[in-house]
Image: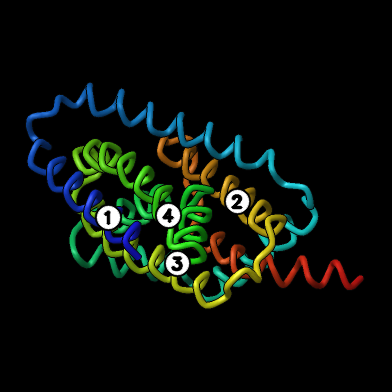
Amino acid sequence: MLGTLFNTATVLVGAGFGLALRKKVPESLRKVVFSAIGLFTLYIGVDLMTGISNPIAVFMALVLGAAMGHALGVDRRIRAAADNLGTGIGAALVQSTLLFCVGAMTLVGCMRDGLQQDPTILYAKGTMDLFSSVFLAATLGRGVLYAAGAVLVLQGGLTLGFSVMGSGISEALVAELSGLGGILLFGLGMDLLGIRQFPLLDLSCALPLLPAVLWLLNLV
């Protein structure tokens, strides 16, 4: 859990610093930096998607996850609950949480921390999130600060889950989960750039469904 605790602290520090500088950062600079973050998020998403070896399984999980998330109102409910804290906080919380928590570094970092008690990858990820959170908070506001709690819960839960599972998760499954995470990050990049907004939390329900879909397809 040391890696997750470090990552949570870096988001808190970075977001706090970004909020303190918010009025001192020119709007033009915010837009440029935000565009850079969005473009780099697109790049990470594309890079992760190339690791998908079973696109049918990923597609099925994505469709089923979207349907389940929509039926449960996951994206709508969480955004609305977060916006009760202040106008626009819901969108900021969702965007920053996905940026911090979805991706290969999160998955592999939590796996290594849980299985081998090696938080090195999460330390590196936390350092990256420190700088990202500064500009995200300066642009999006307090929702980025609240995302530290999501980092603690989600990454902590993943690390605990891997430690309980032991070595029962295969490298192939990690690759497919990372690829699916890449699709979500690509959607997030388009959202950050203002191209199109997706119900990303609804789509994120595909992640826990993917292992079951892969298992069923292997049976067939």
- The chosen color scheme is rainbow
Q: Residues within 10 Å of mark 4 (few under 14, many from 20)?
A: many
The residues bearing labels 1 and 3 have C-alpha atoms spaced at a distance of 13 Å
> Which residue is at the front of the view, 149 or 205?
149
Q: Separation of disc 4 and disc 3 at Cα?
A: 12 Å
- Residue assigned mark 3: 159
Picture residue at 73% right of the left edge, 55% below the top: 59
Q: Residue type at mark 1?
A: Phe
Q: Give percent across and percent down for residue 71.
A: 56, 74
Check contact, mark 3 vs mark 2: CB within 8 A: no
Q: Which residue is mark 1?
A: 6
Pointer 2: what residue?
Answer: 178
Q: Circle 2 — which element?
A: helix
Instruction: List x then y, in percent, for residue 79.
Output: 35, 63
Question: Disc 1 or 4, which lies upstream in sequence?
Answer: 1
Q: Earlier in the sequence, mark 4 or mark 3?
A: 4
* Mark 1 or 2: the one toward you: 1
Q: Secondary structure at mark 4?
A: helix
- Specify the quadrant that holds the N terminus: bottom left
Q: Is residue 115 left or right of residue 76?
A: right
- Which amino acid type is marked by label 3? Thr
